Amino acid sequence: MKIGYPCQNRTLAPAVSTSRTFRLASWSPVRFRETVAQNLEGLRQILEWNVTQGIGFFRISSDIIPFASHPVCNVCWWEEFREEFAAAGRIVREAGLRITMHPDQFALINSPHPEIVERSIAELLYHARILDAMELDGAARIQIHVGGVYGDRAAALRRFEANWRRLPEPARRRLTVENDDRLYPVADCLLLHQALGVPVLLDFFHHQLLNRGEAEAAALAAAAGTWDAAASGLPLTDYSTQKPGGRTGAHAETLDAADFADFLRRTRPVDFDIMLEIKDKEISARRAIDLAAGDPRLVRFRWDGRTEERNNGRSEIGTG
DNA sequence: CTTAGTCAAGGGGTA
DNA sequence: TACCCCTTGACTAAG
């Protein structure tokens, strides 16, 4: 079990960020290359910070390469920045970090509109290129939701299957499907797994909001069973709680320690990695790791760091 | 310098 | 048909 946070580090921000961008109207190869260089340097610093904090799981922001899948982008960024990607990947491999990405709502491979499907395929390929350039194994996943219903759920699921088969191999091999809170519960994701072999990421909070009556333990067992340790790594999950007083489905500002401790207790039979979808990011990740300190599943990873002076001879990284 | 409006992209719900 | 919501930070033009 590794516990992580998504995309931004509020402790290091705004000096360190992977989300620098610019307006489409200001696109130029120079502006693009400057921004990508800054974002990749931000990624390197965040990953190193995570290692020093014993945080073993991180979601890379889809903002890291601005307009990567837009027709305006004619730069082979994955080749030009090969060394920077490889350096980030080296940190991941040497420390044993888990990495994921989560394209946002616009990646819809089950849309009835062919143009939207084409743009979505380009978007997924962009994400795959990042993880490939970092030279990461199959445990580095790209998670998406099933998509829209378009008035006919069965037909929409069939389109997902047909278009999944059309994905370029680099994107297809990393794709992972996640239950959402409005349209597709975990049962539908499991159907896609049966048809395609795609692993199912269980979002516990979404499952509470949308399900077909399955108990959480049953949903977890079923989703965990779709993962293959050698090919796709340990099962992935998302965890959050309801923001008090917020719209239903809004993510909490900070970790609910009592809920998280109970969550760890009741999921004990299954080992998996946990992405905290909580607003204060790395702050809650550290608290969660503290709360999991006595849990036999928790990975306390080591940073070898033998060539890193700044590591100051330390090899055992405390997790609190 | 500060700040409010705006930003590539879709789907679904409501009026 | 038109508008709003999601969800978010960061850019940018206006003041």
Image (spheres, coloured by chain):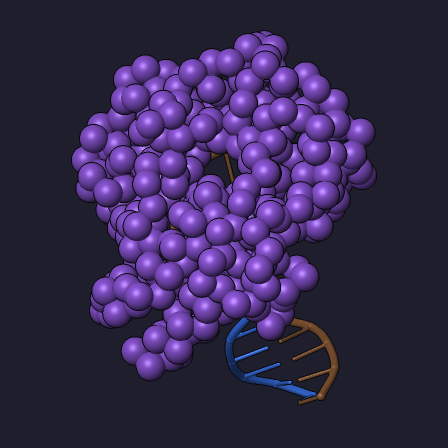
Chain colours: A purple, B brown, C blue
The answer to whether any part of residue A146 appears in the image is: no
| Quadrant of the frame with the N terminus of chain A | top right
Q: For this view, does A232 lie left or right of residue A3? A: left
Total number of numbered labels?
0
- Image: A299 above or below A306: above
Query: Residue shown at 36%/23% (left/top)?
Result: A228
The answer to whether any part of residue A257 appears in the image is: yes
Query: Residue shown at 43%/66% (left/top)?
Result: A40
Query: Residue shown at 52%/64% (left/top)?
Result: A45
- Image: A273 above or below A304: above
Q: Nearer the viewer, residue A7 or A269?
A: A269
The spot of residue A310 in percent (x, y) is 56, 67
- Quadrant of res A150: top left
The spot of residue B5 in percent (x, y) is 61, 71
The spot of residue A23 in percent (x, y) is 44, 73
- Quadrant of res A22: bottom left
Q: Nearer the viewer, residue A87 or A12?
A: A87
The spot of residue A59 in percent (x, y) is 50, 47
Query: Residue shown at 49%/64% (left/top)?
Result: A308
| Quadrant of the frame with the C terminus of chain A | top right
Q: Nearer the viewer, residue A68 or B7?
A: A68
Q: For this view, does A142 lie left or right of residue A51? A: left
- Image: A18 above or below A140: below
Q: For this view, does A270 lie left or right of residue A38? A: right
- Quadrant of res A174: top left
